[in-house]
Amino acid sequence: MKPKVIVYKKVNQKVLEYIKQTCEVVYFEELDSQNDSEFLHELKDAHGLFGVGLGIDKKLLDQAPQLKIVSNVAVGYDNLDLLELSKRGIMATNTPEVLNETVADTVMGLIIATARRMPELDYWVKNGQWDSMLEEKWFGVDVHHKVLGIIGMGGIGTAIAKRAHFGFNMDILYHNRSRNHEAEQTYGATYCSLEELLNQSDFVCLMTPLTPETEKLMGLREFEQMKQSAIFINASRGKTVDEEALIQALQKGEILAAGLDVFDPEPVQKDNPLLSMKNVVTLPHIGSATMETRFNMAMLAAENLVVGLKGDVPPNLIKSEVNTK
């Protein structure tokens, strides 16, 4: 008998067919209040979960006594209670590496768009306001030969450093839990304290995973330490930033601008002051959102799922102090 899997996100048909070769699939394009009871009914004898964004906690796991693996279609896994999963011997997997290059592209796009005020000027031109020579008040700032500070030099941070170093001749500072020798040797990155990075960087890019240690990592004190001419970029998670502190820093002119791909909560509230600030570029969490990358992420997650249900160790088992299966 095939193991039963619940797929709770819209997924490419090729990925779905791949999973069906090995598993019995119950498919929900999305979960909402209308199908919640049906989902919970199917959960009772499910062996695998495949999707993203669903909180996998004790309450849910109590209703899934047969569960063997959770396959997260994302690199981040702050939605998973790893301690509870480990206690129950349930494997958890994610999709690292496959999205590094695409997210790095997005980050560089945010840096350039914010520094050169591209969305603001696009709106200005399309609304017929370009009726004379461009005045200095519309000028942006250079990106090339500036100092880029990267907080979180993992796979994505390293891909950003590569683009910044070779493409824009930027000097790279980074702050991380451990040294990244590849970034230092190949891209000339310099390891430093968070305070040094904030004091010296022209662009501060936050790329840490969301953990209890990184929640609201950027707050009032941190924004005060940045240059008034500096631009803040966040493509990690919304909760890594104290959003009220960011709003205050922008309103007071403590930093020049911000480029944001993530918010807390998401979707962003319509009355969020950041949405009315001309010096803030806002994106709807599109870091990995290309057709190619999202397909590759889903297929990798499917491979993790199938391998785990066959009784082998998935290629992207989340390894942590609380999940050592």
Image (spheres, rainbow, N blue to C red):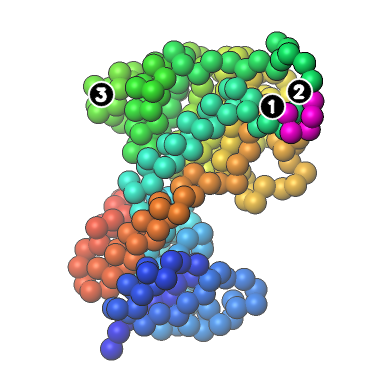
Give the percent coordinates (x, y) of residue 83. Answer: 38, 58
Are the residues tagged 3 and 1 within 8 Å (C-beta)? no
Quadrant location, the C terminus: bottom left
Pick the front one: 109 or 124: 124
Q: Earlier in the sequence, mark 3 or mark 2?
A: 2
Residue type pointed to by label 2: Trp
Which portion, as a residue range, is magenta?
125-130
Q: For the residues marked 3 and 2, what is the alpha-carbon distance in whole angstroms?
A: 43 Å
Relative to residue 198, is residue 179 depicted above or below? below
In the structure shown, which secondary structural element does the residue marked by tag 3 occupy? helix
Residue placed under numbered mark 2 in the picture:
130
Instruction: Please rate how many residues cluster around mark 1, counting C-alpha atoms within 10 Å: few if below 14, some from 14 to 19, many from 20.
Output: some
| Secondary structure of residue under mark 1 | helix
Q: Which quadrant would residue 126 be assigned to in this image?
A: top right
Q: Secondary structure at mark 2?
A: loop
In the picture, the disc for residue 121 is 1
